[in-house]
Amino acid sequence: MTWNKTYAYYKTKKQGAYDSKFEAGYGQELEFRKKAKEIKGYDTHVRTPLVVNGYTVCDYYIDFIIYHNDNSLEYVETKGYATDVWKLKWKIFCAIYEDKENVKITLVMQGKGYKPRLKKAL
């Protein structure tokens, strides 16, 4: 069943379990990769509390968590339009998760391709 709810601010239509056609296309690509055994699996729209100094600032819903065959995780955010609120939450998310072992953070912007987030040099 396809929902035809339009988000006026973003000018997108919900595509089943996904928030946009762009995100649905990326989800379909992950499904192909899973069937080809390139990855173990993936989860969608995972609630991640952003906790700073013991305080929960807010919740962030990451679009995809990919489980790779080498037991590493990849957090993937697909984005067509970046709002100011999203930019702030994204910076907090990256500050918390980018230093963890076996974790990769990837931002996929519509029309711009993949932008892997590289860990900072010590």
Image (spheres, helix red, strand yellow):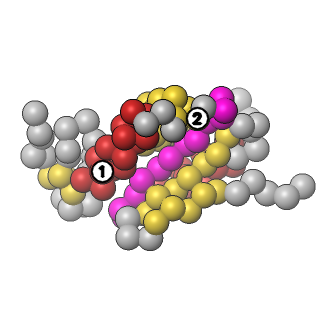
The one nearer the camera, 64 or 71, is 71
Where the C terminus falls, by quadrant? bottom right
Give the percent coordinates (x, y) of residue 20: 26, 51
Indicate whether residue 51 is drawn in magenta.
Answer: no
Kindly indicate whether the residue at mark 2 contacts the one at mark 1 (C-beta within 8 angstroms). no
Are there few (<14), some (14-19), or many (20+) residues within 10 Å of tag 2? some
Give the percent coordinates (x, y) of residue 3: 12, 40
Element under disc 1: helix
Q: What's the mark number on residue 13?
A: none
- Tell me if residue 34 comes above or below residue 80 in the rendering: above
The three-letter code of the residue at mark 1 reads: Gly
Q: Give the residues drawn in magenta, as a range.
A: 70-81
The one nearer the camera, 14 or 67, is 67
Are there few (<14), some (14-19), or many (20+) residues within 10 Å of tag 1? few
Q: Residue, x 64% and y 46% (percent of image)?
A: 104
For residue 56, say whether it is visible. Answer: no
